[in-house]
Image (spheres, helix red, strand yellow):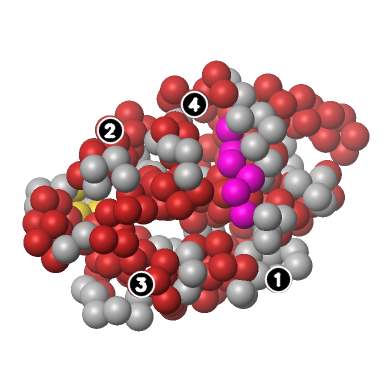
Amino acid sequence: MKKGELKSFLDEKAAQYESISFLAADPIQIPHQFSSKEDIEISAFLVATIAWGNRKSIINNGNKMMHLMDNSPHDFILHHQKSDLKRFDGFVHRTFNADDLRYFIQALQHIYTQHDGLEKLFAQHALSNSLQPAIHAFKESFFTLPHQKRTQKHVSDPMKGSAAKRINMFLRWMIRSSKKEVDFGLWPSLHPRQLSCPLDVHSGNVARKLGLLKRKQNDGKALTELDTALRLMDIEDPVKYDFALFGLGVFEDF
């Protein structure tokens, strides 16, 4: 396809797949259960953290995390006692286990009490056209408390070559407009132009077939390449094309 044809095609697919009709099969349905900003962003962060593997399993375990926090994640994060953390014994999603979850709860408590929440922490280190340095800084702040080294692998670092798919997805959820009732538009201090595409197997394969991506690995260099291509089509909202790439890969076997 020519550049103009490709943009028209992807605009159409992005509009098709950015729809509440797909929420029933997507982990983003879990933060949609809440109404307060803090409950939404905490549940979204935790669900995005375990968003790899079977989507049904992700949703089931995401709901289990919310249940274990009494379906009030912000209140639980702020006011839990050490004895309350015992209830997470036995929780596991692939390699993310109860010890990891307990640390995430403690780290989030630290962020809300010492850094005034997730939005401010990301905004402090954001660039005008990228949040990848902000992700790196966030990870450093997140792991300032005593923790097992293994837990660090559950927050990716773009400065170490990762595409950081799950945390880029979380940022898309928080920052893009809520007009279509999919993403939330909760963080006005940040803008969609700063976002990067959540690059995974599906979006990467479709991007290569469409000539948007040449690099074979789904790593940080590939993300930069894809970001550049998507910004040429829409510099203000490049990550809307995540819906097109993911939808074509998952639902149309493109």
In the image, residue 115 lies in the stretch drawn in magenta: no
* Three-letter code for the amino acid on which mark 4 is drawn: Leu
- Disc number for residue 23: 4
Q: Which residue is mark 2?
A: 60
Whichever of callouts 1 and 3 sits on the residue coming sooner in the sequence is: 3
Whichever of callouts 1 and 2 sits on the residue coming sooner in the sequence is: 2
* Three-letter code for the amino acid on which mark 1 is drawn: Leu
- Disc number for residue 110: 3
Q: Quadrant of the C terminus?
A: top right
Q: Quadrant of the N terminus?
A: top right
Whichever of callouts 4 and 2 sits on the residue coming sooner in the sequence is: 4
The front one of 51 and 65 is 65
* Three-letter code for the amino acid on which mark 3 is drawn: His
| Res. 78 in view | yes
Q: Please give the range of residues in magenta.
A: 182-187
User: What residue is shown at x 74% (from left), y 47% (from top)?
Assistant: 238
Alpha carbons under labels 4 and 3: distance apart: 31 Å
* Three-letter code for the amino acid on which mark 2 is drawn: Asn
> Are dots 4 and 3 in contact, CB under 8 Å?
no
